[in-house]
Image (tube, helix red, strand yellow):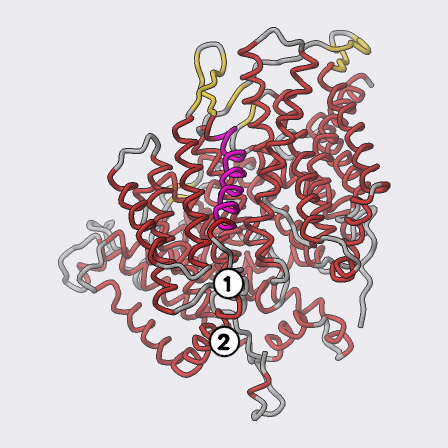
Amino acid sequence: MRQDWFATLKESALTAAVAAALMLPLIGLYTSTKAGGLAIGTRWTELAIGVVLIFLGRFALLRIQNGDRLIPLIGGAIVMIVGFLLPLPNGLLTVCCIAGGAIVFLRCCLAWVTGNLGLEAEKQPIAARTQAFLKKYGLWLGLAVLVFAIIFPWLPFVDRRFIDLATLVLIYVMLGWGLNIVVGLAGLLDLGYVAFYAIGAYSFALLSSNYDMSFWACLPVAAMLAAFLGILLGFPVLRLRGDYLAIVTLGFGEMIRIILINWVDFTKGPDGISGIPKPTFFGLSFSRRPPEDTESFHQFFDLQYASVDRIIFLFYVVLGLALLTNAFILRIRKLPIGRAWEALREDEIACRSLGLNPTNIKLSAFALGAMFGGLAGAVFAARQSFISPESFTFIESAIILAIVVLGGMGSQVGVAIAAVLLIGLPEWFRELQEYRMLAFGALMVAIMVWRPRGLLSFREPTLRLHDDDSGLSR
Amino acid sequence: MEYFLQQLINGVTLGAIYGLIAIGYTMVYGIIGMINFAHGEIFMIGAFVALISFLILGVTGGIPIPLVLLIVLLIGMCLTAVYGWALERVAYRPLRGSPRLAALISAIGMSIVLQNYVQLSQGARVKTLQPVIEGGFKIMQSGNFTVVLSYMQIIIVIVTVSLMAAFWTIIAKTALGRAQRACEQDRTMASLLGIDVDKTISITFILGASLAAVAGMMVTLYYGVIDFYVGFLAGIKAFTAAVLGGIGSIPGAMLGGLLIGLIEAFWSGYFSIEYKDVAAFSILVLVLVFRPSGLLGRPEVEKV
C-alpha cells in the first residue's frame, strides 16, 4: 500500500473528481418552491468547498497509511479550527469540516500512539487483547457496570434529562437482548422486530385506557400477546431461510404499522393514544396530589414531593426488567432449548438428524424474542405516556438490528455497549438535530467497515467436549 | 369491464417501474449474495436528478420534448450510476468476505445516510413537477367512465421493455454478461480464470443504479410528486417483487414487479387503497409458503 507523493495526489484527485460528480446534482444545484412551480438555484461555493475537503481528507488518510504523521496531524487540526472559526455558507459544511478534521486528527494520534497503520493484520492483536481482558475481568466489569447503573440516578452530575435518556437506552438494551435470541442465538434474520415492540406498547396503552388496568397488570399481558404474535408470525415463515425470511418479517412489521394507522376505531389511528398512566410503586402513585382515598409515594414515605422521583422510579423498573431479561437469557442458553437454538443456527440438517424438532425450536425463539420485545414496548409506552404508529417504523427495527450486529451477535455485553453508543450518543448531540440521523447512518457504516464482526466479536463455543483444548477455539 | 381494463393499464405501468428497480436488487443479490438495502435510495436520487435536470432544461426552453426526455434520461443514468458505484466502493467492498449481516447493516446505514443527505441538501418539502407530457388515447367509453391510456404510460412501458431487452442482451450475449454470470456461480474460480471480479461487481452496481435512475425519472414524470422518503417504500416493494419472482433471477424480477404492480392496482381499485401494501405483502407470504424460493427461483440445494 505504500505509495509515493505523486501516486497519492493522483488517487486523491480521482476521489475528488468522483465526489464532484456525486455532489454536482444534489449539492451544487437545489430546487426551491416559488410561485407557479419549482425554481432551481446554484450553490457553487458549497460544492467547491466540499470537493476540496474531500480531496484533503483522502490525501491525509492516504499519507497516514504511508507512515506520514506530522503533516496530516497539523492539517487536520487546521481544518478543524477553520471549521469552527470561518462562517461557512452552510451548516452541513461546517459540521463536515469539523468532523472531517477531527477524524484525520484522531486517526493521526492513534497511529502515533500505537504505531498502527490500520491494516488488517494489525487489528488482530487488539481484538485478542480485548478478548483476553474481558475473559479475565468480565465478571468484575459486569458487576462494576451494575453498581454504576444502580447508583447512577444519585450521582451529582446526573439531571432529569440524563436519567430519562438512560431509561431509553435501557429499553433499547432490552430490545437488543430480545432480538439477540432470534438473530444471534437462533440465527433467524428478523427485520420486523418492531412489530412486537408495537404490540407490547399498544396492548398496555389500550388496556389501561379502556379497562383502567395498571402497568403491573398489563405487563404480563403485553408480554404474552407479543409472544403469541411471535408464534403466529413464526408459523408461515418456518420453511423460509435467510433473506426470504428477512423480507417476510419486514413485511410483517410494515403490516402491523399499516393496521395500527388504519384501524381507527380501535387504535385511534395516526393520532395515537395519549394519557398512558405511569407505573405505581405497589399501588402508590407518583403524582403530587393523588386522587381521593389513595396515597402517593411521597405522602406514604413522608418525603418532600419531587417530580424527578417518577423518572427515577421508571429507571429502576426498566433496570430491573433488563436485568431479568439478562438473567433469563444467560440461564436459558444453558438449558437444552438454548443449546438447540445455537445448534440450529450452526447446522439445521445436523440438528434434525439428531432428533431435534426445528419447528419447535424456531417457534420458541420467535416467541421468547417477541416476549421481550413486548415487555420493552409496554415500558416504552409508560415512559412516553403517548404512542402513535410513528414510533414503530422500519427504522426502529433497523436500529435494534444494528445494535445486535454492532454489539457482536450473541454477546450480551456487546449489545449493551452498542445500545449506549447508538442511542445514547446521538441523543446527547441533540443540538445537531438535523444532522443526527446522518451521523447515525454514517456511524453504522463506519463501525461495520472497521469491525465487520461487531464490537465484541468473539464467539466462544458454549460447550466443549474437553476442557483442555481452549487453544483451539476460533 | 372498463374499470378492469383501466386498472390493468395502471397496474402494468406500476409493475414496469417496480420491475426496473427489482432488477437492481436481484442482480446484486445474484453476484454478491447481499440485500442492497440502499437501492431504494439510489432510485430516489435518480428521481431527484431527473427533476433537477428537467428544471434546468425547462428553464432554457426551446428544446423539443423527446430530446429533453433523452437528455434527462442520459444525465440521470450517468450521475446516478456514479452513486451506485460509490456506494459499492465505500460501504460494501471493504466488507466483502465478512458475515452477511455486516453488509446488511452497512447497507441500512448507507440508506439512512443517503436519505438524510438528500433531505438536508434539497429540503424536506414535497417537490411537485408540472406535467411534461399530457394527454392520452381514449380507448373505451361507457357512461361517464373513460378508459385512458396516457402517453406517459405508453412511454414508460416502451422504455422499460426496450431497456430490459437491451439488458437481457448484455447478460446473455456479451463478455461482460458472461463474466457476471461466472462471478455469480463462483467468485474464486472466476478470478482464477482471469476475470476481474472487483470490476465486474462495480459494473453490476452501475447497471443496477442506472436502471433505478430510469425508474426514478419515470416516477418523477408519471406522478410529478417526489420527496426524499420516496425511496423507502418503492425499494421495499421492488425488493418484495424480486423475492416474489425468485431472488437472483432476472426474468423473475420482471415478473415479480409486474405482479406486485397488478396486485396493488387491483387491490386499491376494488378493495381498499389503505391496505394495498398489506395485500402485496400477504400475497408474498402466500407465494413463499408454497414456493419457498420464489416463482422462478432455483430451489436451494441442501448439502450435508
Residue B182 percent across, percent down from the top left: 80, 53
Query: Can residue A250 be seen in the rendering of this structure?
Result: yes
The answer to whether residue B225 is above or below residue A246 is above
Residue A62 is left or right of residue A276, and the answer is right
Majority secondary structure of magenta residues: helix
Quadrant for the C terminus of chain A, please. bottom right
Residue A393 percent across, percent down from the top left: 51, 44
Numbered disc in front, either 2 or 1: 1
Residue B69 is left or right of residue A21, and the answer is right
Residue A451 percent across, percent down from the top left: 50, 63
The answer to whether residue A374 is above or below residue A262 is below
**Mark 2 belongs to which subunit?**
A
In the image, is residue A208 part of the stretch drawn in magenta? no
Give residue A462's quadrant in the image.
bottom right
Span highlighted in magenta in the image: A7-26
Considering the numbered disc 1 on the image, is that residue within a helix, a strand or a loop?
A: loop
Dot label at residue B223? none
What's the residue at 30%, 54% (across, down)?
A: A164
Residue on which disc 2 sits: A330
Considering the numbered disc 2 on the image, is that residue within a helix, a strand or a loop?
A: helix
What's the residue at 32%, 48% (across, down)?
A: A429
Of mark 2 and mark 1, the one earlier in the sequence is 2
Q: Nearer the viewer, residue B132 or B71?
A: B71
Dot label at residue A451? 1
What's the residue at 78%, 9% (across, down)?
A: B138
**Mark 1 belongs to which subunit?**
A
In the image, is residue A19 part of the stretch drawn in magenta? yes
Q: Amino acid at mark 2?
A: Leu
Are the residues flagged by discs 2 and 1 from a single subunit? yes
Give residue B64's quadrant in the image.
top right
Q: Amino acid at mark 1?
A: Arg
